[in-house]
Image (cartoon, rainbow, N blue to C red):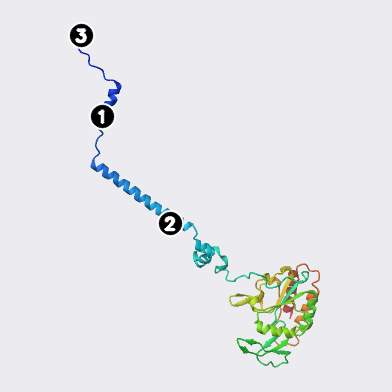
Amino acid sequence: MVSRIIKKTPTKSIKDCRRNSRRKKTPVKSPSSSVVIATINESFFSCRRRLVKIFSKLVKIATPKRSLKKQGFKKLKKNADFDFLFPEKTPETKIAKPLFFALPPSENPEKPTIFLDLDETLIHSSADLPSKPFDFVVRPKIEGETMDFYVIKRPGVDEFLEFLSKKFEIVIFTAGLREYASLVLDNLDKNRVINHRLYRDSCRELDGKYVKDLAQMGRDLWKVAIIDDNPNSFSFQPENAIQIKPFIDDLQDNELSKLIRFFDACDGVKDIRDAVKLFAHDNLQSSLLD
């Protein structure tokens, strides 16, 4: 039979197909493709190393060094790039603020405080012998040299100080040197009615001028007045100031008598600055009439 003579070819199983597919060799990569891949890998790792270096530098910059912690902000202050952290050192604010009040607490807080200038306000002094009679002489030693100063008291100064002492705390605030001014005050304050003395070292220097900053005295500004002949002295608080005429040698001067009448009428005034404003207005009107 034909069917018996023809041999059947065996069919391939699925396993045989899998074996044959595994035996197929993968194509060998050409030399050119391997070189390209190696170059890409090298450039990748090179970029990675660079990025690591950059990030490590950024971390060092952002992390404060121990030496800066130990030295506080000394290094930062020297660097102009950090001036905004220290506004007191910027050119706009050249005046260094004191770390404490110039005066101790008031013994009687209920009393307002009157700051009085010395030269040309309460007295006049000269190193030359004046043509008119003088009240006393002081001989301070300044920079190793002894000097003579002839002092004339302003008319009514003794009565003025005695009157103020009953209602006010009296503080002499002068831009004069301590060596000179302390001797003048020792002679002027025979009755010891002056509560405190402040000299040039308590002033604040601005553009070569000495300013008396009342805000650094430890007193409420609504209970404070300053009497001075120099407007530069009270430029920080002009609303608290009474500018008096400079005294040289006019023995008919009556400015202190005017001030006695003014302060005598200040009883019951809550804010002394309001009274000072009225006094300044009245003085201006009288000077215009004269």
Contact check, label 1 and label 2, Cβ < 8 Å? no
Residue at (32% x, 46% y) in the render: 41
Instruction: Name which of mark 1 and mark 3 comes first in the sequence.
Output: 3
Q: Secondary structure at mark 2?
A: helix
Q: Look at label 2 and name its amino acid.
A: Lys
Q: CA distance from mark 2 to mark 3?
A: 88 Å
- If the image is split into quadrants, where does the C terminus sit? bottom right
| Label disc, if present, on residue 57 of the rendered structure | 2
Query: Where, by quadrant of the figure, is residue 6 drawn?
Result: top left
> What percent of the width, then of the height, locates residue 116?
72, 78
| Label disc, if present, on residue 23 of the rendered structure | 1
Residue at (55% x, 63% y) in the render: 85
Q: Residue furthest top?
A: 1
- Dot 3 corresponds to which residue? 4
Q: Is residue 41 above or below residue 98?
A: above
> What percent of the width, then of the height, locates residue 180?
66, 85
Q: Secondary structure at mark 3?
A: helix
Query: Where, by quadrant of the figure, is residue 145 drawn?
Result: bottom right
| Label disc, if present, on residue 257 of the rendered structure | none
Is 274 displayed left or right of 49 in the figure?
Answer: right
> What percent of the width, then of the height, locates residue 258?
77, 79
Instruction: Name which of mark 2 and mark 3 comes first in the sequence.
Output: 3
Q: CA distance from mark 1 to mark 3?
A: 35 Å
